[in-house]
Image: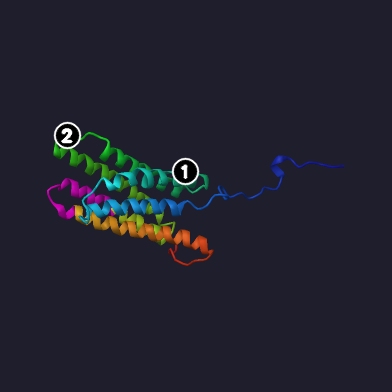
Amino acid sequence: MATTQAPETRPQTAFAPGAHLADPAALGLGAFALTTFVLSVFNAGWMHALPVAFGLALAYGGLAQLLAGMWEFAKGNTFGATAFSSYGAFWISYWYLTGHTNLTALRALDLTGGIAWYLVAWGIFTTYMAVAATRTNSAVLVVFVLLAVTFFILAVANWASGTVFWLRLGGYLGIATALAAWYASFATVTNWTFKRTVLPVGPRA
């Protein structure tokens, strides 16, 4: 005589959330790296056409990175989802703030002070994400540490708006951050493509 098991006693099949999805980290890191690089080249004084960064801020750093964050949610990766979604939103907010907001009515000190606090807030967020990044890998951790320092230096640059030194320093740090993020993206996509570790990303803490 056939019997049926109660639902709670049936063997459970292990299921990895989003196992059918490709790793979105390569896209998210690449989008962040390229957009950061272009803006940082401007901050470093290597180019003077800031609007070049606006399209990237919306399309690649913004929308592409936001999509990467949504795919990380589907894969069950809380860290990746929080990071990519947040920085995607950061770039969209930067695009709107710099290209589509009329700031001419503000006094110069009010404007630079407001932008400085905007950057400090992102620096705080990035700092606690850097703490969480100690449980990812060394390549990602380096990105978050450099980015946190970059945000705080750029905040100082806005408070000391008459001094170009801090802006240039923030630009150089941003370039270093972009290079670190590019490496992490490069390693992620290359190691997956070759199905082995070609580019090391370092151990977790």
Residue 82, located in which quarter of the rendered image?
Answer: top left
Q: How is the protein colored in the picture? A: rainbow
Q: Residue 110's spot in the image, x, y percent? A: 17, 37
Q: Secondary structure at mark 1?
A: helix
Relative to 197, is 42 on the left or the right? left
Look at the image and tell me whether residue 205 can be seen: no
Specify the amino acid type for callout 1. Met
Q: Main secondary structure of the magenta part?
A: helix
Q: Residue 140's spot in the image, x, y percent? A: 40, 57
Residue 150: in magenta span: yes
Residue 158: in magenta span: yes
In depth, the one of 92 and 137 nearer the eye is 92
Q: Secondary structure at mark 2?
A: loop
Relative to 175, is 135 on the left or the right? right
Residue sitting at the far bottom: 198
Q: For the point 26% across and 53% down, which residue is it?
A: 40
Q: Disc 1 designates what residue?
A: 70
Q: CA distance from mark 1 to mark 2?
A: 36 Å
Residue 195's place in the image compared with 61, above or below, is below
Q: For the point 20% across and 35% down, which residue is it?
A: 103
Q: Residue 52's spot in the image, x, y percent? A: 28, 47
Residue sitting at the far left: 162
Residue 155's place in the image compared with 101, above or below, is below
Residue 106 disc label? 2
Look at the image and tell me whether residue 182 can be seen: yes
Q: Residue 50's spot in the image, x, y percent? A: 24, 47
Quadrant in the picture for the C terminus: bottom left
Q: N-terminal of the two: label 1 or label 2?
A: 1
The magenta-colored residue range is 149-166
Specify the amino acid type for callout 2. Leu
Q: For the point 21% across and 39% down, which residue is it?
A: 114
Residue 196's place in the image compared with 164, above or below, is below
